[in-house]
Image (cartoon, grey):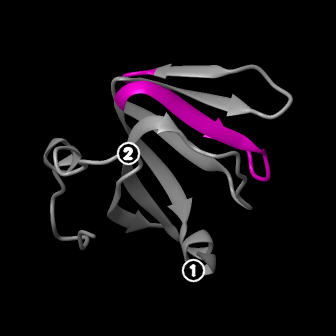
Amino acid sequence: MSTSKDAVSIAQLARTLLVSWDTRDLVSANESVLRIVRVEGTMDWHRHEEDQLFICWEGRFTIELEGSEVVDLEQGDVFVVPRRTQHKTSSSSVAIALMSIGLHTMARG
């Protein structure tokens, strides 16, 4: 993960994500980490104790929310999954997403 003095190349890091759901932590700020992830295939249903921010960096992917409509994200789109909302992310082709995750969430594993 970068320190506050280092610039981060999202495009360069995206090229290092070689397998489905591979992730890299980019930077931390305000008790959260900005993470890059290769979205490919379907993630299992899960939930977080905090809101989760998604930014579609490249390609397109879908977020399904329990009891709600499906959200389709394309390059440049932003979406927040509300805390404690059961959701799953999927893509039929490779997409790159940026997402935030709280440091407290990371500590719990």
In magenta stretch: residue 86: yes
What residue span does the magenta drawing correspond to?
Answer: 74-94
Which amino acid type is marked by label 1? Ala
Pick the residue in front: 42 or 9.
Answer: 42
Query: In this picture, is 55 found above or below 30?
Result: above
The residue pinned by badge 2 equals 20
Which one is in front, 105 or 30? 105
Name the foreground residue: 79 vs 6.
79
Q: Position of residue 10 (x, y in %)?
A: 22, 46
Residue closer to the observer: 19 or 17: 19
Residue appearing at x 78%, y 45% in the figure:
85
Horizontally, is 68 left or right of 97 in the view? Answer: right
- Find disc 1 in the rendering and name its residue: 107
- Does 54 sit left or right of 80 as displayed? left
Q: Position of residue 15 (x, y in %)?
A: 16, 44
Q: Which labelled disc corresponds to residue 92? A: none
Q: Earlier in the sequence, mark 2 or mark 1?
A: 2
The quarter of the image holding the N terminus is bottom left
Which residue reaches farthest bottom? 107
